[in-house]
Image: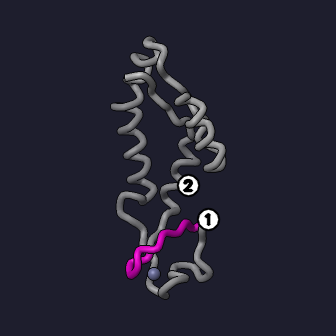
Amino acid sequence: LEGVVVFEVPEEALVERIAGRRSCSNCGAPYHVKFSAPKQPGICDRCGGPLVQREDDREEKVRTRLSAYRGMTEEIIPYYEKMGIVRRIDGDRPQEQVASAIEKALE
Ligand SMILES: [Zn+2]
């Protein structure tokens, strides 16, 4: 193992990103209520089908998933930090900036 990449994103930003996801129950097209909203709320631009939210993406489920992450995954990070292989990346930025930060971290 040569490197561990840790993405740092405030919990509220993660909840907003995940809980806002929707997809068309007919054709599967992905949407987001804030970042990629359909022209008419709840209706697919491509086929007119109804948009649905995955059960797992409901806000309370997202918070449960995040606390499981904190309890199980996050606590191993100090172990890798002692090995000097952790690269922390600010994930609360536009996609291209995060992508180039990942490339840099892996050089
Ligand atoms: Zn559709």
**Mark 1 surroundings within 10 Å by alpha-carbon count, few (fewer than 14), some (14 through 19), many (20 or more):** few
Taking depth in this image into account, of 2 and 78 the one nearest to the observer is: 2
Q: Quadrant of residue 90?
A: top right
Can you name the residue that lies furthest to the top here?
A: 82
Q: Magenta segment range?
A: 24-33
**Where does residue 100 sit, x and y in percent of width and height?**
62, 40
Name above or below for residue 106 compared with residue 16: above
Q: Quadrant of residue 9?
A: top right
Point out which mark residue 16 bears.
Answer: 2
Answer whether residue 106 is magenta in the image.
no
**Mark 2 surroundings within 10 Å by alpha-carbon count, few (fewer than 14), some (14 through 19), many (20 or more):** some
**Where does residue 88 sit, x and y in percent of width and height?**
55, 28
Q: Give the mark nearest the N terminus, 2 or 1.
A: 2
Answer whether residue 27 is magenta in the image.
yes
Residue for badge 1: 34
Quadrant position of the N terminus in the picture: top left
Q: Residue at x 59, y 82 (%)?
A: 40
Q: Residue at x 38, y 45 (%)?
A: 65
Q: Residue at x 42, y 42 (%)?
A: 66
